[in-house]
Amino acid sequence: MSGTNARTGVLALVGARGTGKTTVGRLLAARLGWDFADVDDRVEAGAGKSVADIFATEGEAGFRDREAAALAELCARERCVVATGGGAVVRESNRPLVTGAGFVVWLTAAPEVLWARLCADPATAARRPNLTAAGGEAEVRALVAAREPLYRALADFALDTAALSPEAAADAILTAWIGSHKTSPCSSGARSSSPSG
């Protein structure tokens, strides 16, 4: 896409597990000619084990420390699309890393949509631990409700992916990013107050 490669910094995707951050992020990076990085993938590569195994051996605190280190590294990059972990926004010190790095996109979908997507993904059970005692769709609903205000506060643009193909989601994000009032994704600007769609 002409003109977009001149803009440097990070395009960060935030949102709950199952909203499409990794899939859409890869498409965005390919269209921009940028690098793509997934925070959870970076954590797993550094630890030599899955997120679920990190939780089992180091606890959530150990995982969150690793996540914060990976996020800090990736948010300092140039010309990179970064898919954050769903819970990365919970640690307060992570939030300015994300907003300071560039243009922040919050991907959303209804909890029942997220749960259906997670059930259809064979990697979910092997790689991702339950984060509440409830597990299942009840956990998804609880986490979405708890984290939504945090996602909303970080976002320059919000997009409901429930009815969108990954390609259509990528198109909408690129349109919003190019049309933003920022001169570059690293400039400051008002955050979105509500999701679209």
Image: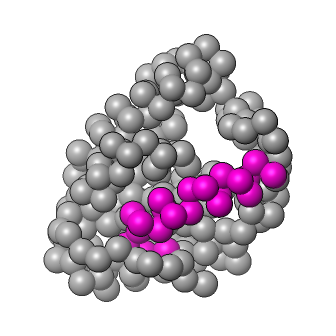
Quadrant where the image shows the N terminus: bottom left
The image shows residue 62 at horizontal and vertical percentages of 49, 22
Instruction: Give left or right: position of 103 versus 53.
Output: left
**Does residue 42 appear in the picture of this structure?**
no
Q: Say which residue appears at 65% left-offset and 76% top-offset.
A: 164
Residue 48 placement (x, y as % from top left): 52, 18
Residue shown at the point (49%, 74%) measured from the top left: 158
Q: Main secondary structure of the magenta part?
A: helix
- Is 167 or 115 nearer to us in this picture? 115
Magenta highlight range: 138-158
Q: Nearer the viewer, residue 46 or 89?
A: 89
The picture quadrant where one finds residue 146 is: bottom right
Please indicate, yes or no, whether residue 55 appears anywhere in the rendered image.
Answer: yes
Q: Is residue 181 above or below residue 74?
A: below
Is the residue 133 above or below the residue 19 in the image? above
Q: Is residue 129 above or below residue 105?
A: above
Q: Place residue 52 in its image quadrant.
A: top right
Q: Is residue 150 magenta?
A: yes
* 141 drawn magenta: yes
**In the drawing, does residue 101 fall left or right of residue 94?**
left
Q: Quadrant of residue 132?
A: top right
